[in-house]
Amino acid sequence: MKFNKFDKLWCIKEDQFNVNNNKYYEGIFTQGNGFMSIRGSFEEGINDAPQDEEYIRMPANVTLETARNPRSKWGTYVPGIVGIHPLLKEEIINLPCFLEVILCFEDEKLDTERCEIEEYTRWLDLRDATLNRIFIWNTKCGAKLELKYSRFISLNDKNICAQQIKIKLLKGNGKLKINSGINGNVRTNGYNHLNNIEMSFTDEKDVLVKTTTDKGDSITQISSTQSMNGEAWDEKLGTNVAFLESNVPMNENEEITINKYNILITDRDTEKDLMLTKGMELLKRAKESGFDKLYEVHKLKWDEKWENSDIKIGGNDNLQIAIRMSIYHLIRSNAEKDSRVAICAKGYAGEAYFGRYFWDTEIYMLPYYIYTNPEAARNLILFRYNTLEGAKKNAKHYGYNGARYPWESSVTGEEQCPLWQYADHEIHVTADIAYAIWHYYMATNDEEFMQNYGIDILVETSRYWIDRVDKNEKGYYELLGVMGPDEYLPLTRNNSYTNRMVKFNLSKTIEYIDKIKKSNVDFYISIAQRLNLRESEIENFSEVQAKLVLCYDKDTEIVPQSEDFYKYADLDFLTIWKDRSKPFGHFISQEKNYRSKALKQADVLELMVLFQKEFSREQIIKAYEYYEPITTHDSSLSAAIHSIICCWIGKEEDTEKFLNKAIDIDMSLEKKGAEEGIHIANCGGLWQLVVFGFAGLKSPMDSEELKFEPKLPKSINSMDFSIIWHNKSYNVSINKDGYEVKAK
Amino acid sequence: MKFNKFDKLWCIKEDQFNVNNNKYYEGIFTQGNGFMSIRGSFEEGINDAPQDEEYIRMPANVTLETARNPRSKWGTYVPGIVGIHPLLKEEIINLPCFLEVILCFEDEKLDTERCEIEEYTRWLDLRDATLNRIFIWNTKCGAKLELKYSRFISLNDKNICAQQIKIKLLKGNGKLKINSGINGNVRTNGYNHLNNIEMSFTDEKDVLVKTTTDKGDSITQISSTQSMNGEAWDEKLGTNVAFLESNVPMNENEEITINKYNILITDRDTEKDLMLTKGMELLKRAKESGFDKLYEVHKLKWDEKWENSDIKIGGNDNLQIAIRMSIYHLIRSNAEKDSRVAICAKGYAGEAYFGRYFWDTEIYMLPYYIYTNPEAARNLILFRYNTLEGAKKNAKHYGYNGARYPWESSVTGEEQCPLWQYADHEIHVTADIAYAIWHYYMATNDEEFMQNYGIDILVETSRYWIDRVDKNEKGYYELLGVMGPDEYLPLTRNNSYTNRMVKFNLSKTIEYIDKIKKSNVDFYISIAQRLNLRESEIENFSEVQAKLVLCYDKDTEIVPQSEDFYKYADLDFLTIWKDRSKPFGHFISQEKNYRSKALKQADVLELMVLFQKEFSREQIIKAYEYYEPITTHDSSLSAAIHSIICCWIGKEEDTEKFLNKAIDIDMSLEKKGAEEGIHIANCGGLWQLVVFGFAGLKSPMDSEELKFEPKLPKSINSMDFSIIWHNKSYNVSINKDGYEVKAK
């Protein structure tokens, strides 16, 4: 395979190995193609990092927990393949690892930490999504080997992952032992979801592993290892491990190339009885194609992706690589055409949050897809349609009609969050989904989607809301016992964000019903029948919509986070938050936090980003100046939103500060945010910051035309990107002097 | 042994066996002597009720959970012998069962459910704390046996439990097989805390079981089984089971008496190396004494107890037996002289709440001990002194100075409650302990206790409070984020009960410091040095005490449960609570509950009981009329308090209604409240209802004289009881015409 020429604006690079950074790179180097994702672990693993340790990860605040598996965590994930945990409910399953290739030279085992390694370099090339590693190994016996690793998960053939290792003996002679196979000694957050692992070999000496999960899913993995030199391979079986072994005598200057082709098929994508046949066929074709051909078709697909998705940033290389990293992970983690799954909070690059789905999808990630790949956006929203029954069950569980989307969604839409304060009270997610539907609809005019799916969600969520409100003495409706986006106040009264979103949800339900009614009465009747929708219900929607409380303090011009916000205690941040490199939450008990004014993240400011047109510049400035000093930014959802706000109100310094904060969330080697997975919502947040913030794209909810109001911060000279608006593609070029939009 | 003559006012009786009631009787028939408690399970167990099933009891709301082990639950508990659970933290350990005696006649195993049983009767005699069972067994082979069982846990010899079984063959001939031993196949809430169970036999054919718990405690149990007929016993060992077997040929009219003497010793009461020797000695003495002698000395101790504790009720037999049941369990569950433990929420008669200590001890149970057994009361409070270090750790954990008592206390005083809403926010327990200290002090004048222990607790808790308050804009202090006694509102502002109790705590700290200062400056200095007490701190105590908010609505004359109480939603109880035989909590989600006005239990009314003098009759009436209709009484702590309130304000019908509700909590065979253990707080509540309610005893905090203001409800003609006041005993006789108090 011919490597792309290294380009620092396209590659994330590790210059030298340090075991303390290993888990970080495993996270940020995660590869995938939507169907599967695999963390960037070494083919040979690292020492003293067992992957089958049993423990219980408690469902605690992820920001504050101490993670297990400190040196290395393997991860092979297929969205939708989930297991059942007695305490944690549903979680994504970490499947057997088929990357494993262990090398020994003259009985010295290759271990990047323990061996003498020089000229080490590893990089993820975002253009073609290949992970590459090159280094020199000076063995104890005096030999010198040059090793070159490359691997990719095919974007063209979703079930295939290909690896190549080139080994050149630069100096000395000796015997190279190669062990290549599949290792099933893995756990998910310390738990074993693999009920049965059947290890064998095919007639063609491929390693074959059939796994059954505790939820009953079947997974077939087949690995073929080939060396161009045609060595003999011995079959070896261990506990949950099957591999091929070859002992190759090498002479100075001799070179060996190992190609490994891995197939992963599940009963979610292929009928169970056909899995093996299909897998063997795919493997046969892969072997026939060979590594280079597989790479070529894979690369073409990535070229297409970048053609629609890339954002060129002039002047700010940090942002340039970060935005490409973000877009890469947004592409890599999304099962584009599969609406049975969405994107989990860690983007299938780790096991924190157990692979569940949050509001992150709709509010943070979805805009990227709406404007670059509307089909993918549609499927993400269809996931919520496909889980509508689960949402109805949730509503019923709480004693309400309609649909109540879960704070942490399972693949069936049922609530998975084991902590009641979030599960019970962070109810805005239901309205966020309605907002996302409308956003998608306004950007695409996808009437077919609205008529067949969108309206169902709008009506069912509205049914929930009219049950969830309480009527106060004055005849107004209230939402009590609410946790807003700020998760540091669990039970507030009339959270402004939530109330406004619910009003939006109800009003768009009414608006769309009105629209169908006016355009085609017969069709309206058929929809009303399908949804068992009565006029009295629609009147209720209107009544609650009109009389739902929205708080505003006219004297201070501040939108209160909640009606009771001013009653919480003031905190002395300077005294409490002694080390700002650590989350605020480290320095205060949850108990004290829950009675004090200390925001975890943007709340009113998030509202202002979503409803830009409703708030004056002065109101936004007042809100920023009131809330930001008491915001801890302990959530990764906070920085990008704050940067957008600062950009809009012209606070240049703070714009850059929060931009860099958002970049650092996953890019900072010091913070190591990517260890437990990618903060994929922040990836979407960064994209929004660039497009809605710096480029100033007007939301299709506020503007029928494609309109920009660019406000480039000092560090950025120019931006070039593509955008899809009402089903047409445009190239957008922005520089300090103005901007240009051209139809593609 | 000569049985007491059966007396329905002294005995709780089961007239016929019904397996659905089995667990209820196991609970209510629990026997004990403070050192150990054992549930009232059959000697032979019942079929299809394995005691070693493994499961995890989740730390949920006990009122609403579905209990495991539905047919039978054995329980052998020693206060202080606790284990460590990975999820549930500390819990009491259910120890191996030494009661087991299994009988087979001609290969038919005695099983009360499956065999043909007639004339069945079982009763717990509260006078001598013996559990008795008599029935006729018609065997399949046509024989007829009469069986008489008796057992007691000696109140004289704390390590001894004695059993007797008399078997008379009324008809037929055949072989009786007796298996008698110790069974270690037990679990605590589904968890195995017994790391090592060593089963053997002594030279004298006693079954010897040495157990080590997962916390490292050692327990030695020895059982000697003797039959007067001198049968041969074979030693048998099974998995965690050791027993003796004898096959006895019986002829018509022959009678066999089996005596079983059981010793239980732990390393908490005896040095580890001496346990076996002491156990063998005790067993030897028990065998020499014989069952009847052991019984006699045991009975004498109970006579003494009843002499000081009994309350004779004229006219209301239900209350008569219920109050005696309550007093029995208060005596039986309390380790009188051991201040290293207190009384757990289920009175060591079950495993709900995991054997932990709540405010129940101080506010519900303690008064009984203060007025009948001050030494026991002192030791209960000393438990809080002994766990002061744990309370300091808790305070530190939350970032505060001083001592913060845990909502659910371990034996070391550390917080065990795994649910944060209680652990973090139900803070009143700390002030409740200060209240209890003052109550004890006022009733006993125990200056020595105050000087050496009480003042330490008062000062350390006050230190916590001045850190826990928030100062509002007007300069007043507030307690935010508080769950009051009403556990259906987790995060309220300025809960009246809590704020008043905290004010009391601070004021009594100041008062007692002042008192010592005035009486003996040198002594004061020594105490100030011991506690590192500074004048500025005392000023802070005064400042916060004086300016702590107490809410009161002058217009409605209602004491609000909390400052924000009126902001919660109103509920339509009639629509929601469809079946009043079930807790309200069954019909509403916690989410909805937490934002609505629906009290779990007395909150403001509890405050009014504790501070009777501060509230006018009108205020109490207003409070009762406002709160009672929105109170669900889902907590067992509610009924007795409501009955006291009703008694005071002259609502006769409601007094009786709540009296009967309180009686039913454990006495009702239909409700089966005692299945998972005794509601021991309600036992104390019933006692308070009789003494503070009906007899109208004035609190020593309000009155220096022993004063009564009797208000006998219609159903009660007279009451006679003893009471200790300022170290003197009095006999109190009350009837409809008046009352008489005589020094004993």
Image (cartoon, coloured by chain):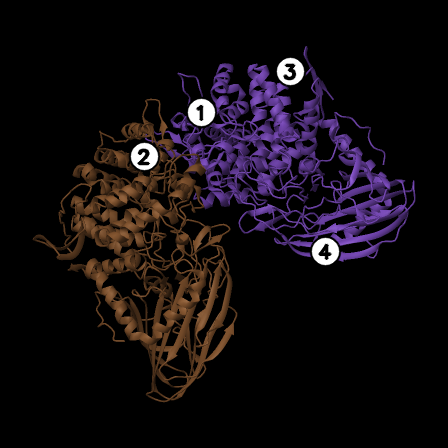
Chain colours: A brown, B purple
Instruction: State whether residue A728 is above or below residue A206.
Output: above
Disc 2 to disc 4: CB gap under 8 Å: no
- Label 1, label 4: how far apart the Cα atoms are: 64 Å
Q: Amino acid at mark 2?
A: Ala
- Label 2, label 3: how far apart the Cα atoms are: 65 Å
Q: Which residue is mark 1?
A: B572
Q: Nearer the viewer, residue B226 or A517?
A: A517
Mark positioned earlier in the residue sequence (3 or 1):
1
Instruction: State whether residue B607 is above or below residue A296.
Output: above
Residue B240 at least partly seen: yes
Residue A633 at least partly seen: no
Which chain letter matches label 4? Answer: B
Q: Answer few, some or many: residues within 10 Å of disc 2's Cα (few below 14, many 20 plus, some between 14 and 19).
A: some
Q: Which residue is mark 4?
A: B273
Q: Amino acid at mark 3?
A: Leu
Labels in figure, total: 4
Q: Looking at the image, which residue is at 46% across and 25% down?
A: B575
Disc sitting over residue A310 in the figure: none
Mark positioned earlier in the residue sequence (1 or 4):
4
Q: Which residue is mark 3?
A: B712
Question: Is label 3 on the same chain as label 1?
Answer: yes
